[in-house]
Structure formats: structure tokens, C-alpha cells
Image (cartoon, rainbow, N blue to C red):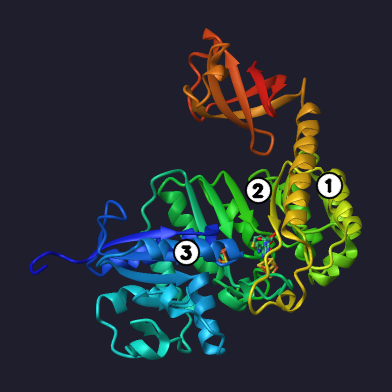
Amino acid sequence: MEGVKKNRIFIKTYGCQMNFHDSGLIEDGLLKNGFDKAGSLNDADIVILNTCSVRDHADHKIVSEIGRLKGDKKIVLTGCFAKQIKLKRENGVSVNNADIPVDYCFAPDEILSIPEILAGNFEKNYNGDINDKGFKEEFKATAKDDYQNFNLIEEYFYNKKVDSGFATIKIIEGCNNFCSYCIVPFVRGKERSIPFEIIYNSAKRYADKGVRELLLLGQNVNSYLSPEDDKKDFSYMLESLTKINGIKKIKFLTSHPKDFNDKLIELIASNDKISKNIHLPVQAGSDRVLSAMNRGYIRRDYLNLIEKLRKKCPDAAFSTDIIVGFPTETKEDFNMTLSLIDEAGFDFLFGFKYSPRPFTKAFEFKDDVSLEEKKERLGMVFEKQKKVFSSILNSLRGKRLNVTILAVGKGKNPAEFKNGILFKGEGLNDRTVYIVNKDKYKNLRIGDKGIADITYIENNRLYGEVI
Ligand code: SAH
Ligand code: SF4
Ligand code: F3S
């Protein structure tokens, strides 16, 4: 319609925290280039889908979302699914264009160009050929890689508004590991670390703005190495960030077991500001499957690592990722995964049914574990995990934990209030502790620290009393 501003954007993000981080960069750039934020998807003129492609299910979700987005909205596809489609086209793999009637398609390493192109300020490297590529307008990948466009990344961190005491910083992009099932190295590209100075200065600025907790992100954070100085590795960076005034806690995601060295273990053990809540994806418990997955370690290595970490940090809490039904996984192999869950003692796990992904090595293998079998195995994984977690919690009964009050008052479940006021606290490596008591704790406030005795456990939750 003439005279009506047609530049309201809405970003819908799928997938992992890396994508949520990228969406922040995209939004920032668009707002700076004269776009406005739409209040909802329905109100938007331009919808940006920042997509995931890690499993087949993720792809389906996006295709059906595009199908729902009818009308006169412009659709911008970006993220890992967008890159998968681009790769398919480049490699002559057939893609049903009718399934993906989008206006623009940007790979994850082209996101910083989105604002310029949508604003029409971009003259070069621009392909307007609709029929050829299936997209109405496609930005052509050039030698430029937006994750190496450090100025823009720094500017983003610099200007980012802070509305809580928590901030995420992406420290490394891409992955060189090529686990045989995983599409990430193909859609995210090779590993590129962001220079130490940018991360350090960003963290400092965040701290000045009131951030107390940082989450460092990457597909494999512990292979971080500053491009400008090969002594500045992940341990060096972690330690440097803990010295920033105001920073109280640092978490990181995701670590690869094969790169978790002794220096890092020592640092985690000795530094109070580093979270002892460690996500360490194992994927499988059988050496044969681990080797077919190209994980670079065997079961014993993984369990030794957990043991070493527990020895150095007795209070560490571990979580993991598990894939069931990888090609050729027998019942015996699978039982090794179950027993590993027992032996490692995870607080939490993410479990997935194996899903064949284009371009990966395992895509060539026969997906020979039936869907029913995968479902059954996944159910058994969750069942096992429930028991393991329950015994971890039971071992905490009667213990005294340091807790920080995170929330006070109403929860979803009124039964929680049967004994009075409920406080949600964070104790012993971020495990949630519910403090239920009567008037005694009336004066507790969010952020208060205290010591709690764990008095009972119900429905896999810790309940305690502040002393
Ligand atoms: N970089 C991280 C996370 C990668 S994606 C890591 O190395 O662990 C998150 C999880 O998705 C993986 O840990 C894996 O468990 C799961 N995943 C990846 N590809 C998969 C596939 N093809 N099928 C099922 N699960 C998959
Ligand atoms: Fe994928 Fe493996 Fe890289 Fe993780 S380490 S992103 S699972 S290839
Ligand atoms: Fe998905 Fe890409 Fe993250 S495939 S899990 S959004 S890196």
C-alpha cells in the first residue's frame, strides 16, 4: 500500500544458542538500517527465519512454517537450513523449490549482509535471477566471511543493550570435527575463533553495564585459539574473563571430550567463578559406535575424564547428549550406552533419535535401526536417566548447600506452596533447590545467599530449609 511503511521485521529463531546469538546480530543490523521491530509475526512485513538443520525434524518444522507464511510478507531464510539448501543447489542435489518459496536465502556466514541487502544498499555480489536458483533474490557467497568481520561483531557487542545480569558471547564459530552423523561442519563451516581482545573487551563492557554472568558459546569451545596469538587458548581466556571486575560466574557450551585437557580441568577446579556444571556430549557408550561416529575417544577415555573432573571438583554436575539408533547400533551397543549413563552419573541429558543428514559420512550408511526401535531405545535412555538423577538427588539428602535465591513466590504448581512460601534457589552447581517454609523466610530476597539443609526430595526436586 502506498505511503505505508513496509519495513517491520520479525525474526523467528530455531535451533541452538548459536542461532539465538546470531539473531541478535541480525536484528541489531536491521534496526540500524532503518527497519522497525514488528510486535508479532502477523504484524511483520519481513519475516526472517533463522533456521536449524541438525535433524530431519528441524527441516520439516521450517518447511511447514514457510508454508504457513502466506500473503504479502517477504520471507528471508537464514541459518543452517538455509545453508543446507544452498549447498544442495551448489552440488546439484535436487531441491523442490516449491517447498521453499522464500525471497532471500543467506548462509550463517552471510548474516551481517542481510541489513544492507534488505535496505537495498548492496550493489555487488547480488543475484536477482529468480528462475535459476529458485529464490527471488539470492545473495551469492563471496570470499567474505561475516564471522571474520570482527569490526561488526565488536560493534554489536559494544552497543548491545543489557537487560539482565546475564549475557552470551560467541567465541568460536564452525566446527572441524566432522562427527560422521553431523551436518554442523558443513553448514557452519570450519572453526574460526573470535580474537581474544574482542571477547575480553566485550565482556568488560558487559560487566560495566551490570552483567554478572557470562555464557561463552561455540560448537566446540575448548578448541578456541585466538587467531592473533596462539598462546591465548580457551583456558587462558576463561581465566582472563574471571578477573574482570563484576563478573561472578562463567559458563560455557559446548565442550568436546577429546579437547578437555588437564590445564582446563585444573583451572575449573581452582576457580570459583567458573561453573562446575559441565555439558560434555558423549553420544554413545560402545567403542565400535563411537569410532563409526568419528568422535575421537573411546568409552574408557570419556569415563576417565569424568572421574578426573570429579576427583578435582567433587561437586561437579555433568550433562550430556546421546544419540540412539546410529547405523549398525546393536542392542548390545545400546546397552553400553545405558551402562555408561549409569557409570557417568549425569544430572541431565538430551537424547536424540539418529537422523540421517545430507553431506555427512553417515548419510551413506544404511539407516538400519527402525524408527520403533529408536523410539524404544530413546525411552529407555530417559528412563535410565530418571533413575540416575533420582539417586544423585537422594545422595544430597541431609547435605548442607550454599544457595542463591533466584525467585520468590508463585510457581506453576500450587502444591509447591503447601508448606508456605517457596523460594527457588540455585545451589551446588546450579541445581535448583526449593526452599519451602513458613513466615520464617519472609525477608528473603532475590539474589540473597544462604545455606540450606536439604530436608526432602519429591518428584525429583530438592527441598530444603535455609539455616
Ligand atoms: N557441538 C556440539 C553440539 C552439536 S549439535 C557437540 O559436539 O556436542 C547437538 C547435538 O545434536 C549433538 O551433540 C548430537 O547429540 C545431536 N545430533 C547431531 N547430529 C545428529 C543427527 N544426525 N541425528 C541425531 N542427533 C544428532
Ligand atoms: Fe557436530 Fe561433532 Fe562438531 Fe559437535 S563436534 S558440532 S557433533 S561435528
Ligand atoms: Fe541447529 Fe545449526 Fe545450531 S544445525 S543446532 S542451529 S549450529
Q: Which residue shows up at 74% across the image and 54% down it?
A: 372
Q: Is residue 151 left or right of residue 385?
A: left
Mark 1 sits on what residue?
344
Viewer-proximal residue among 26 and 314: 26
Q: Is residue 176 left or right of residue 305?
A: left
Label 3 Cα crowd, 10 Å radius (few <14 / some 14-19 / many 20+): many
State yes or no: discs 2 and 1 in contact (Cβ < 8 Å). no
Viewer-proximal residue among 411 and 266: 411
Residue type, numbered disc 1:
Ala
Mark 3 sits on what residue?
62
Residue type, numbered disc 2:
Ile
Write down the quadrant of residue 343 in the picture: top right
**Ligand 3 shows up in which quadrant of the image?**
bottom right
Q: Which mark is residue 254?
A: none
Residue furthest to the left in view is 3
Viewer-proximal residue among 401 and 370: 370
Which badge, 1 or 3, comes first in the chain's sequence?
3
Which badge, 2 or 3, comes first in the chain's sequence?
3
Can you tell which of label 2 and label 3 is closer to the viewer?
A: 3
Vertical arrangement, residue 162 with respect to residue 231, above or below: above
Can you tell which of label 2 and label 1 is closer to the viewer?
A: 1
Mark 2 sits on what residue?
274
